[in-house]
Image: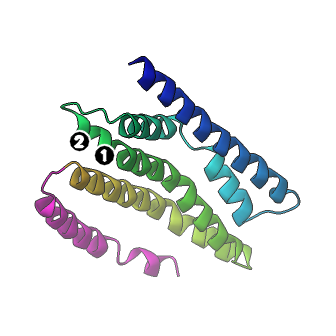
């Protein structure tokens, strides 16, 4: 276990160092620039430490060839950590894309209409995004997700039919 802790801490430190280098490099590129570089800086700087911990556990156990009854979970840990991080990045990505779309509107009236349109859709986009992340995670854990996908498909059709008149009422 001492070897595992030493290797784990070394890998975790290496990941944190790479993360720090990426953040500082993006910070120097970001000076006097906005838009995508600022967005990527915010995403990279918000990587959860649990993602690094999950990768460090998986790599340390792979390096030391630790075989335990829960080794299947340790193999899946990096994929689940990536899915978790993608879920955390979903909201800033959706907000950034909506803000970019609103900035393209030239008249103030069009901006207000677009903002009013995207407020309820923003919540719907987030729910769909987290539903996809959850389905992918359950699939990676070995659950049969075909019935869940069918239910989400039927629910998606119901939501589409329910909101089909929303854009018409704002024009």
Q: Position of residue 123 (x, y in %)?
A: 44, 56
Marks 1 and 2, how far apart in space?
A: 6 Å
User: Which residue range is magenta in the image?
Assistant: 142-171
Q: Give yes or no for residue 33 being in the magenta stretch.
A: no
Residue matched to label 1: 76
How many residues crowd around disc 2 within 10 Å: few (fewer than 14), some, or many (20 or more)?
few
Question: Which mark, by number, is residue 72?
Answer: 2
Which element carries disc 1, helix, strand or loop? Answer: helix
Which part of the image, by quadrant, shows the N terminus? Answer: top left
Marks 1 and 2: CB-CB under 8 Å? Answer: yes
Residue positioned 53% across, 61% down in the render? 94
- Which color scheme is applied? rainbow
| Front-most of residues 18 and 131 | 18
Q: How many marks?
A: 2
| Front-most of residues 71 and 78 | 71
Question: Which mark, by number, is residue 109?
Answer: none
How many residues crowd around disc 1 within 10 Å: few (fewer than 14), some, or many (20 or more)?
some
Residue positioned 60% across, 33% down in the render? 13
**In the visual, does 17 lie left or right of 73?**
right
**In the visual, does 58 lie left or right of 67?**
right
Q: Position of residue 157 (x, y in %)?
A: 23, 73
Which element carries disc 2, helix, strand or loop? Answer: helix
Q: Give yes or no for residue 145 being in the magenta stretch.
A: yes
**In the visual, does 158 lie left or right of 15?**
left
| Front-most of residues 25 and 107 | 25
Residue positioned 39% across, 59% down in the render? 129
């Amino acid at each position: 276990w001492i070897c595992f802790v030493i290797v784990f801490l070394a890998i975790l430190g290496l990941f944190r160092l790479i993360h720090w280098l990426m953040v500082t490099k993006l910070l120097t590129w970001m000076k006097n620039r906005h838009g995508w570089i600022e967005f990527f800086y915010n995403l990279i700087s918000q990587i959860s430490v649990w993602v690094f911990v999950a990768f460090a556990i998986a790599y340390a156990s792979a390096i030391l060839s630790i075989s335990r009854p829960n080794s299947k979970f340790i193999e899946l840990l990096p994929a689940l950590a990536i899915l978790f991080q993608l879920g955390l990045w979903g909201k800033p990505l959706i907000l950034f894309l909506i803000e970019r779309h609103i900035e393209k509107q030239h008249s103030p009236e069009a901006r207000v209409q677009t903002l009013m349109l995207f407020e309820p859709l923003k919540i719907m986009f987030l729910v769909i995004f987290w539903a996809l992340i959850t389905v992918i995670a359950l699939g990676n854990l070995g659950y049969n997700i075909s019935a869940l996908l069918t239910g989400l498909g039927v629910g998606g059709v119901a939501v589409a039919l329910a909101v089909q008149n929303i854009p018409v009422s704002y024009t």
